[in-house]
Image (cartoon, rainbow, N blue to C red):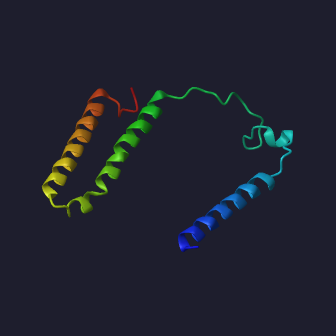
Amino acid sequence: MNSLTTFLAIIVILLLAMLFISFWIPQMNPDPEKLSPFECGFDPLGTARLPFSLRFFLVAILFLLFDLEIALLLPLPWGIQLESPLLTFVWISTVLVLLTIGLIYEWTQGGLEWAE
């Protein structure tokens, strides 16, 4: 039995042990007090399903979009060490130009304004 097989066997045994423990350890009889909503000790004042501004959703999507820019730029130091660093520079410049155009578009359309 080589070390890889031993390692995989240990992983499977630990996985099964954790699954078994997670299903049998928790208490399975909830009471109404635990199932009731909690708002700092007060009774709930209204419904929890209030509509929220679509602006928050838009800002979250924009944040995720422009946050991906960091993930695209992280491999840049390793890409410069390739045979053709000029090609890497062109691709990164293209990504940055496209993201900058997208930011300018959102800015001119008023997507970054909080007050209307």
Q: How far across and how far down the image is residue 110, in percent?
A: 32, 29
Q: How far across and how far down the image is residue 14, in percent?
A: 67, 64
- Tell me: 26 left or right of 113: right
Q: How far across and how far down the image is residue 104, in percent?
A: 25, 35
Q: Nearer the viewer, residue 102 or 52?
A: 102
Q: Nearer the viewer, residue 69 or 110?
A: 69
- Tell me: 65 left or right of 39: left
Residue 84, image quadrant: bottom left
Residue at 35% x, 51% y is 71
Q: How far across and how far down the image is residue 88, in percent?
A: 19, 53
Residue at 84% x, 41% y is 33
Residue at 29% x, 33% y is 107
- Numbered marks: total: 0
Residue 66, image quadrant: top left
Q: Nearer the viewer, residue 39 or 73?
A: 73
Residue at 79% x, 37% y is 36
Q: Look at the picture and state if 58 lies above or below 96.
A: above
Q: Look at the picture and state if 82 lies above or below 65.
A: below
User: In the picture, which quadrant includes the C terminus?
Assistant: top left
